[in-house]
Amino acid sequence: MSSQERTNPDRVGAAARWTALQQIWDHEELVQVSGGSAFLRWDIPAQLPSPALRLGSALALPRHTQVRRNGLLVMGPPPDVDRLLATMVAEDLLPEPLGRVAVQRGSLDAVARHLPLADGNDWEWLCATDVPARAAAEDRVVRLEVADEPVIRELLAAGNPRTDARPFEHPDQHWAGVRGDDGSLLACGVREHNAAGYPHLSGITVHPSARGTGLGVAVTARLTREGVEESGVCTLGMYSDNAVARRVYTGLGYGEVHLWSSRDLSR
């Protein structure tokens, strides 16, 4: 090997990226080094509250979860995630206090070697950038108001007890639903802004007695259309064991699926 090859700055820089811990403060750079992750583009604020850490092709980003706890987002293949977490623990770079981690599916065991993980769930993030076709029952969808909060909570408890949706917790929430002939609430959902400021859906719920009638599709289509028309994108999350919801969302044009495993930290 020639002396020129040994001192080639491009090779030195490439080697450093794979062996040295890097801080990333710029949102666009973060998206680029991730390979164009739609999740990082549409779900992470443009102004990063603290730097992302990169080692090899692994990324770790402190963030607030949907329920406002300190969390850590971890992406990348297991070997690099293993090295990244080992370095963060050794250099005391973990967020404090750390309540929960969200790890790219397949790399959870690498994180568990360094953090005391407890219970959690597997979930998926999706986004839509095209206005969906009008759903058959969409003309039945109406706007829900603050006065409807008690019946929304009843419906969520009956049909979707795992949801993180909290009716009218934030002033920018737009709840929509479908009522039965007797005035009871049969379906609901909410569009609000995520931490990055883009439309996000949650709480999509159909009463058990009305499932299979297209009401969930109708509510989701209405809220998605409003979100895409407002911002050019609409996002949502779903538990991975909900095959029915997946069919509804992908049928309405949701894609760019990101698979996550989230776990609390044991104390």
Image (spheres, rainbow, N blue to C red):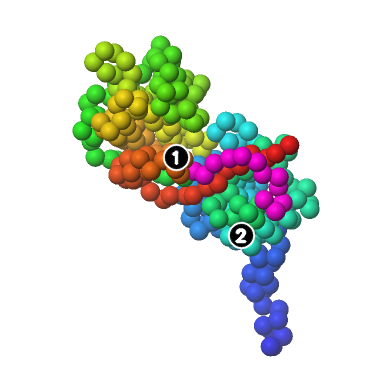
Quadrant of the snapshot with the N terminus: bottom right
User: What range is drawn magenta here?
Assistant: 112-123
The residue tagged with tag 2: helix, strand or loop?
Answer: helix
Upstream in sequence: badge 1 or badge 2: 2
Calculate the distance from the C-alpha at mark 1 to the C-alpha at mark 2. Answer: 24 Å
- Report the residue marked by disc 1: 238
- As drawn, 192 above or below 261: above
Disc 1 residue type (three-letter) = Met
Let me know if residue 232 appears in the view.
Answer: no
Q: Nearer the viewer, residue 52 or 144?
A: 144
Residue drawn at (23%, 36%), measured in percent from left and top?
134
- Report the residue marked by disc 2: 78
Label ID, residue 147: none
Residue 257 magenta-highlighted:
no
> Is residue 39 toward the left or the right of residue 26 in the image?
left
Q: Nearer the viewer, residue 249 or 175?
A: 249
Residue drawn at (53%, 52%), measured in percent from left and top?
105
